[in-house]
Amino acid sequence: MFIIVFQLFILIHSINYCNFFKKKQMGTKKEHNTLEREEFLERRRIYMREYRAKQSEKRKKIREKEKRKKQREKERLNEKLRLKKEKEKERKRKIKEKKKRPVGRPKKIGRKKKWKRKKEHKPRIYKKLPPFTYRIVSCVNQKQKKIIGDYRYKSDAYNVFSNLKNTSTGVIFPSTFYSGGDVPKNMVNEYVLLTTNEIDKPVYYRDEYGKIREVKTDSKKWKIIDKFKYEVEETFWVFGYDKVSDRKNFMWIYDNIIMDGVNISYEYKRVMIYMNKLLVKEDNGNIDIIICKCEEDSVRMYNMMFEMVRKEKVKQILFIGDFSEISEKRRRLEKELVDITGWPLKKIRMRNQTYYKRV
């Protein structure tokens, strides 16, 4: 029994000794794990290095392939353009050859083509025209207002001049004043024929006093050959219409204001003068106001209308004279005009159309 126990003891002791020797020779379990990890990391580093190298090589090959593809595309386009240019060049050459005149008899069947020699181009020689030596101008109070035209020949100038003489007639109410300042001035309208040529004898005319006077100009270049006075139809400002763009002439006022509705109704119309205005008052209180340039024009218009109404024997139109004198009638009339127009009293009392200045 003792021997068996002893043998077991020796066996266990030998097993423990062997295990101790193995541990000492191989190291501990922890040291063994660290060695394995280092080997794994080393292998992993080697693998990643090789993988990156392969990937870079692959990308390099793809770039080269793209580059070669672009190069081929570029060469293909260049070739296409070259062929297109060659075709265009060939087409132009063929057109040019077609346009060339065939030598000798044409091979075309049918009617023969007649070849004509081109005429030599001769430059056109223009006849030199004479200069403009005649001119017609319109003048107001011996001052040039407008150039009617310039002419080369005397006959053309005289034809236009005679036409102007014929068309300047037929004026019913001629304009005798123009508003060129605070007070209207007398107006004389004339057509003048001028020339730059030398004249044989001076031109004379008879002035308003009957004296014969020589016609002269301020110009050193132009000389007067002939002239005549012409008349212009006067226009008036009717209240209610534009005083510049919608002025009315004498016959319009006579037909549309004086004689309007006379034959239909039996109402009376009263025509009167007030300063430079002609007033037409009806029975219903309506007043038509015609503004003239000055008092002389309003009086002349009043007298002319009176003669025309008397000839037609119209009894419903009464001409009651001038209300310019200071009186109670004038004050009542002024009050009515202020109510109708809305003008200040100073503007209503003005005697000339250009006198009133708004403050």
Image: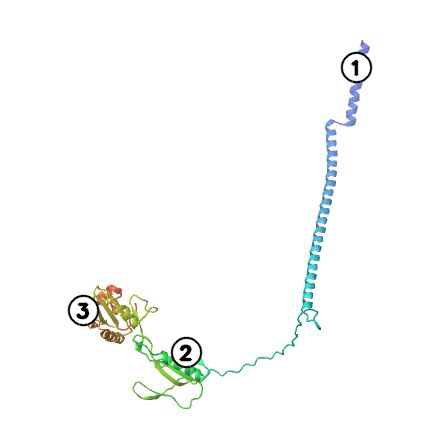
Q: Position of residue 269 (x, y in %)?
A: 22, 68
Name the residue at 37% across, 84% down.
227
Which quarter of the figure has residue 253? bottom left
Q: Pointers 3 and 1 in contact (CB under 8 A)?
A: no
Q: Which amino acid does label 2 sit on?
A: Ile
Closest to the observer: 93 or 235? 93
Camera-near label (1 vs 2) is 2
Q: Pointers 2 and 3 in contact (CB under 8 A)?
A: no
Q: In this view, does 89 lie to the left or right of 198?
A: right
List the residue tagged with mark 3: 329
Which quarter of the figure has residue 91? bottom right
The numbered mark at residue 148 is 2
Q: In this view, does 344 lie to the left or right of 114?
A: left
Q: In this view, does 272 lie to the left or right of 13?
A: left
Name the residue at 34% across, 81% down.
229
Marks 1 and 2, how far apart at CA = 158 Å
List the residue tagged with mark 1: 9
Q: What residue type is labelled 3?
A: Lys
The mark that comes first in sequence, 1 or 2, is 1
Camera-near label (3 vs 1) is 3
Marks 2 and 3, how far apart at CA = 50 Å
